[in-house]
Amino acid sequence: MGARKQEGDSLLTIYDSRDERRVTFQRRLDGTFGFQEWRFWVPEDSWAPTGIGDGSRLATLEDAIREAKGRVEWLSAAMAAQ
């Protein structure tokens, strides 16, 4: 799956150990920060949002990371492994 990694406009992208899920962090036009979890769908050969984090608007990137760690079960372990 590594060949399919793509970050786009994210400030930070964290992949799970199998490159099947990722969390992207971005700064919105209004200055707030947010995150989105994605899952790679092999049949469609593309990334699809899971809905976790959709619409989050936080004051700092650190706040977004903290919230994501609380909502995405695999994220803390993936970040510790990097």
Image (tube, rainbow, N blue to C red):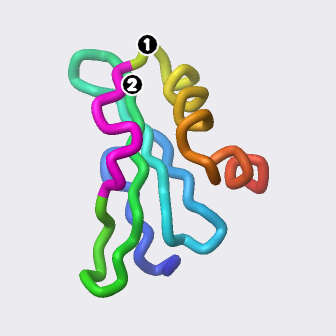
The image shows residue 17 at horizontal and vertical percentages of 66, 68
Q: Identify residue type, mark 2.
A: Phe
Q: Nearer the viewer, residue 81 or 43?
A: 43
| Marked residue nearer the N-terminal end (1 or 2) | 2
The image shows residue 25 at horizontal and vertical percentages of 43, 39
Q: Residue at x 54, y 38 (%)?
A: 71
In the figure, is residue 64 to the left or right of 41?
Answer: right
In the figure, is residue 23 to the left or right of 56?
Answer: right
Q: Which residues are magenta?
A: 49-57
Q: Identify residue type, mark 1.
A: Ala
Asked whether the residues under the numbered discs 1 and 2 touch, taking CB atoms below 8 Å apart as contact, a structural biologist would say: yes
Q: Residue at x 77, y 48 (%)?
A: 80
Local secondary structure at mark 1 = loop
Q: Can you identify the residue that label 2 sits on? A: 33
In the figure, is residue 25 to the left or right of 73?
Answer: left
Picture quarter with the C terminus: bottom right
Disc 1 from disc 2: Cα separation: 6 Å
